[in-house]
Amino acid sequence: MNLSRRHLPSTSGLTALEALARLESVTAAAEELNLTQSAVSRQLQALEAQLGVELFVRTKKRVALTPAGQRYADEVRQALDRLTTAALRLQTNPEGGALSLAILPTFGMRWLVPRLPRFARAHPDVTVNMTTRINRIDFGLEPFDAALSFGNADWPNTRSMLLEDETVLPVAAPQYLAATQLREPDDLRKQPLLHIQTRPEAWNDWFEQHGVERSVLPGTRYDQFATILQAARHGLGIALIPEYLAREEIAEGRLAPAFGPPCPSRGAYHLIWPEDRHKAPALTAFRNWLMTEINEDEMLPR
């Protein structure tokens, strides 16, 4: 459907409206846009006149949005965010030969980064730009082509590829375990437990798999695996960490298993990308390469 561009308001009017809705002040909007208050007021008046709808309620001291104005401002904000994202994507990837990837800090650095030299050799024309993120990405608002995620890959309007299932293992510093007698799973519940904030039920899931009833489990909480690993190494308690991290820590003698073997966790690691980026050349090359990596991993002995 082709819409006449004569109905499209000026960008200056739209940015003034969005700033007013967010900052709730013409003065603050003017400061942010580096304009005078009168210039912002003129832009708002011109926008209202063009649309023929009352967008503002004017009093002696302030300008407030009407309900219709607020609804329109919300839609304008989404449109401006999309335009900004498109501009950033164009600037960072003008020829389509770059991939903007959001990665989980620990999994990205431990699982993906060591493999990337092989991707670089296979695809020297593609640059992979990485930014760490813990929370879910809104691909409509941020200039990412794909993201590494832990969970169920249930993001709306996306596709996904399973990278690796996860198993977890309780570990602690060797000297800590040497001074502690752990004969059965319930013994761990009496120890200082280290929790990761993004997986609040991880310990209870582990105990449940070992026949121990769910309960309130006190202990310290950490925002990333890098910090919880440091806490475990220094003898602050027992950490429940992914087996791929435990392997390296145990092999180098920094940590030791508190009770084994590894158990499956609730989620898995995925590559997730938006539907509208599915056929992007750089992303397609990256997905195909990852599939080869995963297939080769499955053939290796554990």
Image (spheres, rainbow, N blue to C red):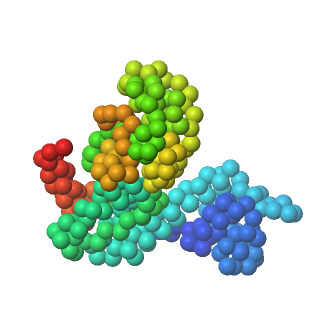
Q: Is residue 11 above or below residue 134?
A: below
- Tell which of 13 and 126 is nearer to you: 126
Taking the view exactly as shown, the residue that stands out farthest to the front is 179
Position of residue 222 measured from the top left corner of the image (x, y, whole percent): 53, 48
Number of callouts:
0
Name the quarter where the N terminus is drawn: bottom left
Query: x and y percent of residue 141 in the render?
Result: 47, 59
Judge from the rendering whether residue 217 lies leftward or rightward of residue 170; answer left or right: right
Question: Looking at the image, which residue is at 18% across and 55% down?
Answer: 293
Toward the viewer: 97 or 176? 176
Q: Quadrant of the C terminus?
A: top left
Q: Is residue 192 visible?
A: yes
Task: Please indicate whether residue 226 sits to the left or right of residue 220 in the image.
Answer: left
Q: Where 219 falls versus 93 (above or below)?
A: above
Query: x, y (%) of residue 230?
Result: 47, 53
Q: Nearer the viewer, residue 32 or 121?
A: 121
Instruction: Name the quadrant containing residue 144.
Output: bottom left
Give the residue at the far left of this rendering.
299
Q: Is residue 245 visible?
A: no
Camera-side residue: 247 or 63? 247
What residue is at 70 percent from the left and 69 percent from the top?
29
The residue positioned 37% from the left and 25% from the top of the image is 209
List x then y, in percent, for residue 271: 31, 52
Q: Residue at x 39, y 70 (%)?
A: 89
